Image (cartoon, grey):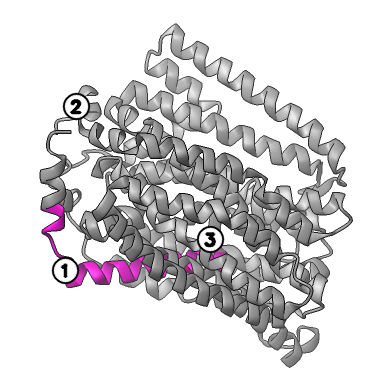
Amino acid sequence: MATSTADEGLSEGKKVSRAGWYALTMVSAAQAMSLLDRQILSILAPHIREDLGIGDAELGLLYGTLFALFYALFSLPLGRLVDGWVRTKLLAICLAAWSLSAGLAAFAQSFTLLAISRLGVGVGEAATQPAANSIIFDEFPRHLRGTAMAALGIAVALGLGLSMTLGGVVAQWWDAAFPGRSGPGGFAGWQAAFLIASIPGLPLAWLIWRMREPVRGGMDGITAPKDPAPFKSSAGVLAAVTPGTNWFYLWHRKAGAKQWTINIAALALILMVCIGMTKVTQGFSPRPPIEALGMSFDPHVLQWFVVAFGAFVIVNLFQSFKLTDKPAYNVILSPSLMLLMVVGGLQTSINYGVMGFTPSFLIREFGLSPAATGLQFGLLSAALGIVGPVVAGPLSDFLTRRLGGRGRVWLTLAALGISPFFGIWTYSAEDATSFYLRFTVYSLILTLWLPPIYSLMYDLVLPRMRGITSSVYIIVSTLLGLGMGPYFVGIVSDKNGGDLGQAIISVNVVCPAIVLILLVVLLRINRDESTMLDRARAGGEPV
């Protein structure tokens, strides 16, 4: 890319305005609220299970599979809307919507209303990461983006920690203060926790609504043209990727025989793999059916249906790119970017497997109460989530200035290469004190990968493509992470008689693949960075 050095120098010469720091604060707060409303279910699970008489299978469906399906699907049209409409307004609307949906869980008396609540949270939160990343990259120059992404990492940790602390403490306090639902509204403790967690999102949405919209691409010197019909384009993405309507889209776009063959063959292959995995997992860990909405569901069938759905959505998305947005197809479908998304997805499966089941591990293994677990583990996770990115962000920026994109890859490789050994050490602890000390080291290592890998991904695409790139990453990381991590830990735990420690350790089986992929990225990253503009121009992009 002939202009890369000049563009990088232009970016490094720019400073972050006061409005830029304010924007970072607001979108980070939105990210924290997203994790708070998403993860509070994990600490409230024992209360919900007892009160509503539902089982682990139903809770697993609510926490992982059901949420993942709608979060991943709607991230794509909302990510496209991020690239064409006013990002601050979109983020504000979605924040208000998911906050109201989270509060709806307070009124649940059955699995059905809880499921509707989780669907709303999943759809609303689907815009958070694309909008936040796009706004930040238009407020911060290249040499400070690692630090900016570290702020988002801190927000994630705060949201996770607050969800456990608030959920555990509020639920226990409320039940003690108002036994037998004798308090205001007749709420149980877990219902009050959902309601309280949902309230802060509404004033935050108002502040983000009033926030200044940054110039798209201004920090990179690549000003994006105004999208004349962003909502129409967003609806087109939803139609193009949704199984079923995607065939009407292919017909409407006059796709050739090759495109139809690729689509049908991909669907057949995906179904074959997922049917095979359903049979394998049913044999490995048989589970009773889930009763919901007057019907009976096999949890393994549901799990692999969601995986098949998501995989087919990804195929449809890239086919739609090729038919309607060849520059995006050429830029996003680059080896380094695709491999980084897979790395992020595999590592997210570890993170969700760890964070989704560690509260239950502490309660079962060391006899801690849900309130004590929420307070201790929640506060520790939040503190570590702040310290890790504070180190990783500036370190990522320093290595970028010295080594370019390869510096970020080296940092990611170092952190993820040694983390499994610390994971085994941590979940082999014999008491709670030893666990917390070991988890401190383990967690700090795990937080080092987020700032560099996020910065790498969004530097590999044009500014107008950052929203949809973030959405592609969301669906990959959701399928591999939220959709697979907790599920894998759960079935291993069931197989091993409830040994959560060994089940959590077992999720590190993907680590060798992560290391191998990062070694390939290390060889390719500079080449793919330097050819990004050329590939966009080859697709017809006027840059």
Visible residue check, residue 516: yes
- Mark 1 vs 2, N-terminal side: 1
Over which residues does the magenta segment extend?
A: 10-37
Going 63% across and 61% down the picture, which residue do you hit? 422
- Position of residue 458 measured from the top left corner of the image (x, y, whole percent): 32, 46
Q: Is residue 33 magenta?
A: yes
Image position of 243 (left or right of 366):
left
**Marks 1/3: CA–CA distance:** 31 Å
Visible residue check, residue 47: no
Amino acid, disc 2 = Arg
Amino acid, disc 3 = Leu
Image position of 175 (left or right of 167):
right
- State whether the magenta stretch is mostly helix, strand or loop: helix
SS of the residue under disc 1: loop
Going 43% across and 15% down the picture, which residue do you hit? 251
SS of the residue under disc 2: helix
**Residue located beneath label 3 in the image:** 446
Q: Is residue 247 magenta?
A: no
- Position of residue 62 measured from the top left corner of the image (x, y, whole percent): 68, 55
Whether the residues at callouts 2 and 3 have beta carbons within 8 Å, the answer is no
Image position of 454 (left or right of 211):
right
Amino acid, disc 1 = Ser
Q: Quadrant of residue 188?
A: bottom right
Tell me: residue 26, above or below residue 115.
below
Quadrant (top left, top right, bottom left, bottom right) of the C terminus: top left
SS of the residue under disc 3: helix
**Residue located beneath label 2 in the image:** 537
- Position of residue 280 measured from the top left corner of the image (x, y, whole percent): 80, 33
- Mark 2 vs 3, N-terminal side: 3
- Position of residue 447 measured from the top left corner of the image (x, y, whole percent): 49, 62
